[in-house]
């Protein structure tokens, strides 16, 4: 049965997955921007160094010093780019974000249907969702708490529209409840009547 406790748990999972999806998406974008920035700096520095080295013009014998400085900048930016693995981290963060998005979609497919018309059993569904979240938590790369608080998070990320929807469900009459179920029939296919995932969901 989908009682108040089960619905509150569903909303909690929805809020959690939505928040993590957005955090990891922003982290992926930020690291990708850093990768592009340091890559651009490295290319520019290398280009300038090459131009200077091939130039025959000198000014008070300062060319070797300028060339050495720019070459050092190029080497440092390239080293930072590789050491902090910006591109690799960006790819991992985006992958994690997509994984949370998939879980969020599963929750919404059930949450959008009135509790009285859900064919999936609450205990089985919530257990599967918790297992998926636990598995993802064990395999993901943890974000810096400082970066999360300063860059990756927004207060609105935790807001779940399912909370308002479930409050609305309580005010519906029988025909309106049935309309909600009919409008979300596609969601019923996500799980069989026994609560097991279909083969397409597992693969």
Image (cartoon, grey):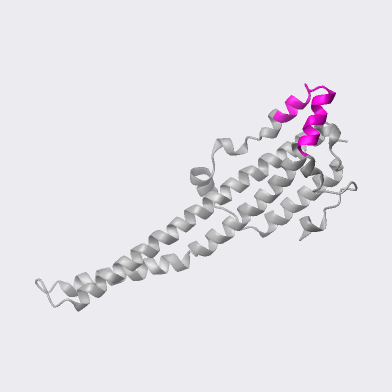
Highlighted magenta segment, given as a residue range: 165-184
Q: Residue 61 occupies which quadrant of the picture?
A: bottom left
Give the position of the N terminus as an image quadrant: top right
User: Was residue 121 drawn as part of the magenta stretch in this picture?
Assistant: no
* Residue 74 locus on image (x, y percent): 33, 69
Relative to 140, say whether 23 is above or below.
Answer: above
Q: Residue at x 67, y 60 (%)?
A: 139
Foreground: 32 or 120? Answer: 120
- The answer to whether residue 168 shows anywhere in this view is yes
| Residue 113 can be seen, yes or no | no
The quadrant in which the C terminus is found is bottom right
Determine the residue positioned at 82% across, 53% down. 197
* Residue 31 location (% of width, % of height): 48, 57
Q: Name the residue: 39% across, 59% down.
A: 37
Residue 68 in the image: x percent, y percent?
25, 73
Residue located 16% across and 73% down the image? 63
| Nearer-the-camera pick, 197 or 89 | 197
Magenta stretch: residue 171 in it?
yes
What kind of secondary structure does the magenta stretch mostly adopt? helix
Looking at the picture, how far across and down is residue 150, in whole percent? Answer: 49, 44
């Amino acid at each position: 049965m989908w009682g108040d406790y089960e619905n509150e748990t569903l909303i909690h999972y929805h809020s959690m997955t939505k928040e993590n999806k957005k955090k990891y998406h922003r982290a992926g974008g930020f690291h990708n921007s850093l990768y592009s920035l340091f890559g651009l700096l490295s290319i520019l520095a290398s280009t300038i160094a090459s131009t200077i080295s091939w130039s025959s013009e000198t000014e008070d014998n300062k060319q070797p010093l300028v060339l050495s400085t720019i070459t050092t900048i190029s080497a440092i930016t390239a080293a930072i780019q590789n050491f902090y693995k910006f591109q690799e981290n960006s790819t991992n963060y985006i992958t994690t974000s997509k994984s949370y998005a998939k879980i969020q979609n599963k929750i919404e497919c059930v949450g959008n249907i009135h509790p009285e018309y859900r064919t999936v059993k609450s205990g089985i569904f919530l257990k599967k969702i918790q297992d998926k979240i636990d598995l993802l938590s064990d395999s993901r790369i943890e974000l810096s708490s400082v970066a999360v608080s300063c860059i990756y998070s927004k207060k609105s990320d935790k807001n779940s529209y399912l909370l308002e929807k479930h409050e609305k469900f309580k005010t519906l009459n029988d025909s309106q409840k049935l309309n909600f179920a009919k409008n979300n029939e596609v969601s019923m296919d996500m799980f069989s009547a026994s609560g097991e995932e279909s083969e397409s969901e597992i693969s």
